[in-house]
Image (cartoon, rainbow, N blue to C red):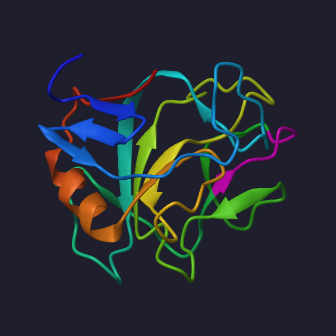
Amino acid sequence: MTPDDLVLTPRGVRFHGRLWPCTIGKGGIKTRKQEGDGATPRGTHRIVGMLYRPDRIARPAPWARPIGPLDLWSDDVADPEYNMMVRAPHGFGHERLRRADPLYDLVILTDWNWPYAVKGRGSAIFLHQWRRPGFPTEGCIAFSRQNLHRIAPLISYRTRLIVA
């Protein structure tokens, strides 16, 4: 582990000398994650991207990419582009990245089951804004809006998410 790592602990994520409160998947932490189980996957996951809503927030880091109205994330195991960012119209199951609520105004992408996805092993694990403290996710790790916006510019190409 390095100071650049985001390390999930029972009390939150340890990063840059601070403990950041967070929520995890409703299915707890699992070594053998599957699509739809609501679990946060155990392991060391690289940070591979950052997306943001330019109509709502300023660019959080120089390398962040804007989310447009047609941007989606495929979560359909029948899709040849399963667990990839895709664009509308898209004939397979997907999640809209440009949501009405603020949960995906800022999204930090991990390399969970990416870029060569194993069908059924679970789609994207994001770091994003929580609904409220203690409210679990579908497997992602979520933070308060304020803390997520503080964490984002501290992330570097060396940053990893460690879920022990």
Looking at the image, the residue that sits furthest to the right is 78
* Main SS of residues in magenta: loop
Towards the viewer: 40 or 114: 40
Closer-to-camera residue (155/118): 155
Q: Position of residue 86 (x, y in %)?
A: 62, 53
* Image x and y of residue 119, in percent: 79, 28
> For the point 55% across and 30% down, which residue is it?
112
State the residue in front, 51 or 34: 34
Q: Which residues are magenta?
A: 73-79
In the depicted structure, whether residue 52 falls above or below residue 164: below
Residue for point 83% across, 54% down: 92
Q: How many marks?
A: 0
Tell whether position 120 is magenta: no
What residue is drawn where x is 68% and y is 67%?
88
Dividing the picture into quadrants, the one containing residue 64 is: bottom left
Image location of residue 79, percent across then percent down: 81, 42
Decide if residue 21 is on the left or right side of residue 40. left
Say which of 101 and 144 sits in front.
144
Q: Is residue 123 left or right of residue 42?
A: right
Q: Specify whether 91 is left or right of 51.
A: right
Image point (38%, 36%), residue name: 48
Where residue 96 sits in the image (x, y, percent)?
64, 67
**Can you say whether 136 is above or below 11 in the image?**
below
* Rendered image quadrant of residue 36: top right
Please give left or right for residue 133 compared with residue 122 in the image: left
State the quadrant of the N terminus: top left
